[in-house]
Image (cartoon, grey):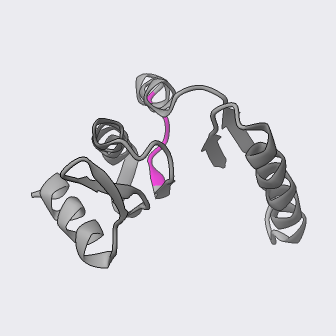
Amino acid sequence: MLTTIKIAMPEVERHFDHNVSLAVKKALHAVSLKKFKKPSTMALSEIIAAAGAPFDLIYIDGSHQAPDVLADSVLAFELLRVGGLNDLRRLSVEHGASRQAGPAQHAEARDRLVH
């Protein structure tokens, strides 16, 4: 099962849908897709409330605001299978200015979340 959460960004969604359709055609096994079109905190909360099966991989590339990143990370962590991978790709904010987070910042954020 592939689950995706998207916010109304028509051009991005068209590209995403096209790329997913190409990947599904090449998949060796049947793929089912569930797309949530709402804020990630709402969608992740609904999946948790519905006792959704744990995920092997969670890839988050959503809002880059610190409170949103934290909320998504905590909610996603609840859905992650033991031994699964949570791949956070966000911008970090330092002293009010955004900058691209590198591997060291991702590792620090991950360590703070799980320790």
Q: Quadrant of the C terminus?
A: bottom left
8 up-or-down from 19: above or below = above
User: Which residue is depicted at the point 81% across and 66% down?
Assistant: 23
User: Which residue is depicted at the point 79% across and 65% down?
Assistant: 29
Position of residue 52 measured from the top left corner of the image (x, y, whole percent): 49, 35
> Which residue sits furthest left?
115
Position of residue 1 measured from the top left corner of the image (x, y, whole percent): 66, 49
Position of residue 49 measured from the top left corner of the image (x, y, whole percent): 42, 22
Lateral position of residue 59 relative to residue 18, left or right: left
User: Which residue is depicted at the point 24% across and 47% down?
Assistant: 96
Lateral position of residue 64 relative to residue 94, left or right: right
User: Which residue is depicted at the point 28% across and 36% down?
Assistant: 67
**Range covered by the magenta-colored residues:** 51-55
Q: How many marks?
A: 0
Query: Would residue 32 be visible to someone looking at this image?
Result: no
State which quadrant residue 11 falls in.
top right
49 part of magenta stretch: no
State which quadrant residue 28 falls in.
bottom right
Name the main secondary structure of what is drawn in magenta: loop
62 up-or-down from 22: above or below = above
Position of residue 20 measured from the top left corner of the image (x, y, whole percent): 79, 57
State which quadrant residue 18 falls in.
bottom right
106 up-or-down from 95: above or below = below
Lateral position of residue 82 relative to residue 24, left or right: left
Query: Would residue 61 be visible to someone looking at this image?
Result: yes
38 up-or-down from 25: above or below = above
Who is closer to the viewer here, 39 or 102? 102
Lateral position of residue 15 relative to residue 85, left or right: right
